[in-house]
Image (spheres, coloured by chain):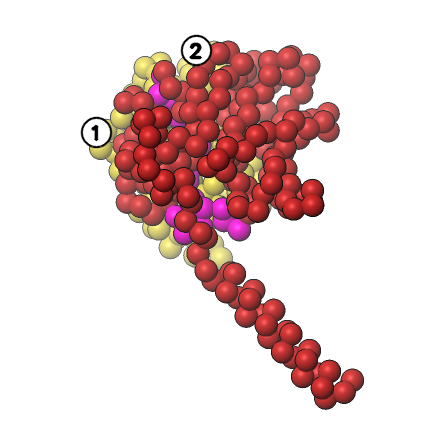
Chain colours: A red, B yellow
Amino acid sequence: MTRRTLAVLFVALTVVAVVSALGYAMPERSLDALERPREASDRLPANAGLLDYIDPGSAREVASFRLASGREHGVFLSRTKDGKQVCLFDTDLATGHQGGGCNDAGSVFAGRKIQISLGFEGGPSKATVRDVRIIGLAAADVESVRVELSDRTTRKVELTVDRAFAWAMPQGDLDRGLEPRAVVAIGPRGKTIDRADTGVLGGP
Amino acid sequence: MRRAGVLVATALALLIPPTAHGAAQEYANWWWDWPDQGAGSSFSSGWRHNWFLKDSPGYLATVTFIDNSGYDWHATVRNSFKTTATAWQSSAVKKAHCRSNTAYEFYGSCVVATN
């Protein structure tokens, strides 16, 4: 190997190292949904279960869906009252039941391309589980999202303008004994860039 | 590594969500070592919020409420966020339950709270 080749190799490796370090050290880009102007639909229900812990003014409805049982749900992204975490909560717009998760505000995706949360009613027996849903948030380079079921078929899920998604499992699929297994994030050129396990329905 | 758990426990305690109007009970606070390891709170009609606070994100975990009649699960949530949370606005007598769904070891605590 010549001295010139070694020098080129050294420069190339240095550039790769610096770019990687910058990518690792820089905080994630601020979530656009939290910065956009507030709309009427962003208002959390007054009876929202976790209202005591989040800054209601920061809440943005990033997706909505209807459960198999007909109940209307909103998916809200918001900051906690102390601003340290960002939460994604599935919210029953009538009863105020809420569920989801929170990550540190500077690392909402925690190094992943998608963050998801599974919710359901009933159990622990699988036979009594109903109203299965998955909510989630996708990073900027995710082009589409699919839910993978236990029979290895997939269901495409639409990404909203706020890069969120929500999927309510059809009762028919549940009646056939199917259950979600994972959510797959598809990136450029149709390549799978992340896969988040949902775990199995019900208890052990 | 376990010695670090004391520090983590202290840090997690600071993360316990402030209860504006009610009470909170920490019903688990330890290293989670195996999948399906779980914990439960006492029964009460007042419980509304159930939190699984982990030392870092990436560990799949479940929070739910279990009623004291048919022992059915309600408002179940499962995810790998750093904080996994659910709220069930019901006056039924119930207990909070949390469960690890991962084989990876992590430190975490579970907290149930009233409104």
Rendered image quadrant of residue A75: top left
Rendered image quadrant of residue A190: top right
Q: Secondary structure at mark 1?
A: loop
Q: Given the current orientation, which residue lies at the most extreme bottom position?
A: A3
At x 58% / y 43%, what residue is drawn? A142
Mark 1 = which residue? Answer: B21
Mark 2 = which residue? Answer: B69
Q: Amino acid at mark 1?
A: His
| Magenta stretch encompasses residue B83 | no
At x 23% / y 29%, what residue is drawn? B22
Rendered image quadrant of residue A177: top right
Q: Amino acid at mark 2?
A: Ser
Mark 1 belongs to which subunit? B
Residue A136 position in % (x across, y down): 51, 34
Does the rendering let one see residue B89? Answer: yes
Does the rendering let one see residue A118? Answer: no
Mark 2 belongs to which subunit? B
Q: Quadrant of the C terminus of chain B?
A: top left
At x 71% / y 86%, what residue is drawn? A4
Residue B112 position in % (x across, y down): 35, 31
Q: Are marks 1 and 2 in contact (CB under 8 Å)?
A: no
Using the image as rendered, state which of residue B98 and residue A165 is in the foreground.
A165
Total numbered badges shown on the rendered structure = 2
Q: Given the current orientation, which residue lies at the most extreme right position?
A: A1
Using the image as rendered, state which of residue B85 and residue B10 is in the foreground.
B85
Mark 1 vs mark 2, foreground winner is: 1
Is the residue marked by circle 1 packed among few (<14), some (14-19), or many (20+) residues within 10 Å? few
Using the image as rendered, state which of residue A94 and residue B25 is in the foreground.
A94
Using the image as rendered, state which of residue B105 and residue A128 is in the foreground.
A128
Span shown in magenta: A95-111
First along the sequence among labels 1 and 2: 1
